[in-house]
Image: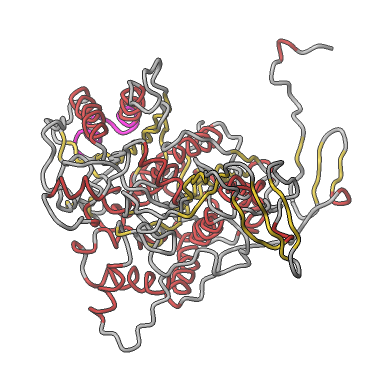
């Protein structure tokens, strides 16, 4: 019996706010929801953004929250796009020697051979250079790109714990993974005592690593700026560090750990590994996610140099306007000019189906399958290829095999990669349209949440998944609201591309297909099952009596999760961060030829008693 991975907790943060309790989803579809459904999401954003409601009317406060969320003009807390730092090479040449004064302590340890040093009063010296000299002078300039999908204004992901000198991506990891764990509504120690230590897995990372000042960015630029690398920059810059932080400071896990990278499909690469391990019975509890903090001057300039980002000039040209419409900078499947870089941290907690019922965990959805394929031979490493045809078709076929034709033809939709580039709108729409035709789907609804959030690189599919869970909670497919009209070169004969939110009901969708494409030929598609479908399947497997017992246990779990949401709304929530706690050493290990036991873990790690290859076993 293959175990079914079910989602029992989720959380994180992106430009729409918290993912937990569907707060971010509600911000995206706010104009379709009743006021009662928006009370908690907007109070959550108020707390995240550290806004004081005193002296503000409710409409004024909401206006301020709206202005500080979703895709918008780049804020100066990252860097000033009007004054980018740059040093221009400036040669000094002349017939006469060049002379200047400075402190003796400012002289380089190795003096250039053409320099003559003359001591002056105090610690001053005169330098006379008898050859041309090269200077690097500050020459700030204006960025072509001034828009990004930033976390809510005023939000500091490291504010709730001792986060000093940690890269932003790791601060977001601690916040996002803590958020996901606390939505489970079951204390982590109770979960840990119900499974073997080797049955816990963490699958997390960052597609680009930590590239800000506290990580690899500071490491690589230190000497050129007259500084020294720090002891933390190299270590904290590793791409797998989000998984390491979760193990070391949140879970205290000695179980499986992994970080899979597939460029902009990295979240689904990690999800795939967790799903495979749960299906095979190797893992019973998995924490899955990605954290990306790429809004730095260097990364923005790098993608701009590839002509991948939406620039001010191109946005003005598209609209025939004098002022860029930053809110509509990301336009999946419309007349567009490039993607909008964004930051996000998204995490899931998965149980196998039996453990979820045993502990009464809330079931938010299930993962049927994840498929990953490369493109084969390529002319350009960044160009799309055939691999995504394979991944999406296999995902739809897997859903058909499990749920039947009606589910995929009339009760499914696609969360498209929808990067908002001219190339993506053509190639991905062709994949979606042809897949719909192949499986007999007449009008396949397509969502593309990058129109709200921007493109968060490795975490992008996590943004898609979090939004998909919101559909089952509130019943609306998010429209592509920045879409004025579908571009002429988009293949949409069998697709439903709409700027309007579509009401489908909480149980109107049985399966969602998440699609992700990444540089280098990294393609992934996942088949996400609705919670009402998962419960129906589990009743078939475990029986009505087991489901009744589960419902009773789940009522208690939901109360605990709601207590966490209440703390969020009061601004009293805190991330999990157990620095220096519960550290195990050699004295905590008991080892013999049959098993290994760790202090604090109820179950021993038993060594395999039967060989994996019985036919090869030697006496």
Can the viewer see residue 548 in this picture? no
The quadrant of the rendering that contains the C terminus is: top right
At x 66% / y 46%, what residue is drawn? 234
What is the x, y in percent for residue 408? 25, 34
Residue 3 is covered by the magenta coloring: no
Q: Residue furthest front?
A: 95
What is the x, y in percent for residue 45? 37, 69
Can the viewer see residue 93 in this picture? yes
Viewer-closest of 323 and 564? 323
The colour scheme applied to this rendered structure is secondary structure
Please provide the residue range marked out in magenta. 399-410
Residue 534 in the image: above or below residue 476: above
At x 71% / y 49%, what residue is drawn? 116
At x 20% / y 39%, what residue is drawn? 333
Residue 387 in the image: above or below residue 224: above
Viewer-closest of 272 and 366? 272
What is the x, y in percent for residue 566? 44, 74
The answer to which quarter of the image holds residue 381 is top left
């Amino acid at each position: 019996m293959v175990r079914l991975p079910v989602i029992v907790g989720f959380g994180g943060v992106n430009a729409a706010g918290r993912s937990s309790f569907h707060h971010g989803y509600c911000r995206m579809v706010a104009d379709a929801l009743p006021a009662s459904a928006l009370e908690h999401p907007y109070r959550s954003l108020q707390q995240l953004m550290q806004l004081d409601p005193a002296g503000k009317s409710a409409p004024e406060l909401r206006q301020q929250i709206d202005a500080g969320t979703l895709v918008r003009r780049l804020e100066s807390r990252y860097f000033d796009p009007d004054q980018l730092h740059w040093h221009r090479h400036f040669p000094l040449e002349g017939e006469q020697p060049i002379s200047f004064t400075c402190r003796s302590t400012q002289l380089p340890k190795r003096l250039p051979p053409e320099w003559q040093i003359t001591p002056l009063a105090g610690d001053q010296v005169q330098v006379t250079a008898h050859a041309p000299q090269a200077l690097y002078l500050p020459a700030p300039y204006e960025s072509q790109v001034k828009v990004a999908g930033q976390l809510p204004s005023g939000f500091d992901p490291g504010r709730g714990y001792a986060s000093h000198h940690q890269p932003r991506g790791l601060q977001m990891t601690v916040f996002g993974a803590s958020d996901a764990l606390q939505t489970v509504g079951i204390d982590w120690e109770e979960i840990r005592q119900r499974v073997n230590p080797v049955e816990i897995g963490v699958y997390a990372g960052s597609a680009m690593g930590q590239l800000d000042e506290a990580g690899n960015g500071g490491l690589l630029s230190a000497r050129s700026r007259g500084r020294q690398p720090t002891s933390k920059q190299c270590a904290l810059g590793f791409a797998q560090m989000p998984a390491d932080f979760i193990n070391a400071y949140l879970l205290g896990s000695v179980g499986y750990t992994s970080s899979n990278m597939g460029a902009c499909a990295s979240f689904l690469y990690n999800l795939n590994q967790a799903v495979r391990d749960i299906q095979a019975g190797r893992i019973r509890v998995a924490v899955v996610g990605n954290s990306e903090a790429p809004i730095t001057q260097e990364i923005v300039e790098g993608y701009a140099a590839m002509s991948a980002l939406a620039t001010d000039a191109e946005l003005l040209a598209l609209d025939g306007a004098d002022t860029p419409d930053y809110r509509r900078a990301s336009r999946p499947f419309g007349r567009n000019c490039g993607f909008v870089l964004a930051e996000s941290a998204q995490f899931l907690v998965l149980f196998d189906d039996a453990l979820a019922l045993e502990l009464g965990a809330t079931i938010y959805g299930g993962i049927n399958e994840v498929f990953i394929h490369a493109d084969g031979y390529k002319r350009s490493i960044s160009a799309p290829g055939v691999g995504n045809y394979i991944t999406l078709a296999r995902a739809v076929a897997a859903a058909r095999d499990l749920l039947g034709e009606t589910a995929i033809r009339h009760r499914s939709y696609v969360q498209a990669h929808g990067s908002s580039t001219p190339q993506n709108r053509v190639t991905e729409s062709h994949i979606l349209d042809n897949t719909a035709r192949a499986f007999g789907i007449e009008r396949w609804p397509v969502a593309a949440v990058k129109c709200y959030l921007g493109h968060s690189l490795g975490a992008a599919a996590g943004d898609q998944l979090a939004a998909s869970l919101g559909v089952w909670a509130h019943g609306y497919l998010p429209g592509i609201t920045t879409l004025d009209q579908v571009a002429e070169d988009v293949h949409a004969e069998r697709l439903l591309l709409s700027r309007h939110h579509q009401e489908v009901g909480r149980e109107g969708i049985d399966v969602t297909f998440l699609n992700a494409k990444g540089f280098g030929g990294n393609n992934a598609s996942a088949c996400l099952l609705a919670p009402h479908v998962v419960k129906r399947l589990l009743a078939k497997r475990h029986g009505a009596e087991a489901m009744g017992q589960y419902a009773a246990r789940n009522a208690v779990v939901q109360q605990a999760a709601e207590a966490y949401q209440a703390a969020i709304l009061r601004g009293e929530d805190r991330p999990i961060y157990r620095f220096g706690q519960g550290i195990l050493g050699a004295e905590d290990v008991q080892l013999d030829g049959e098993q290994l036991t760790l202090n604090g873990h109820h179950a021993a790690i038993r060594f395999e008693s039967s060989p994996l290859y019985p036919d090869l076993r030697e006496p």
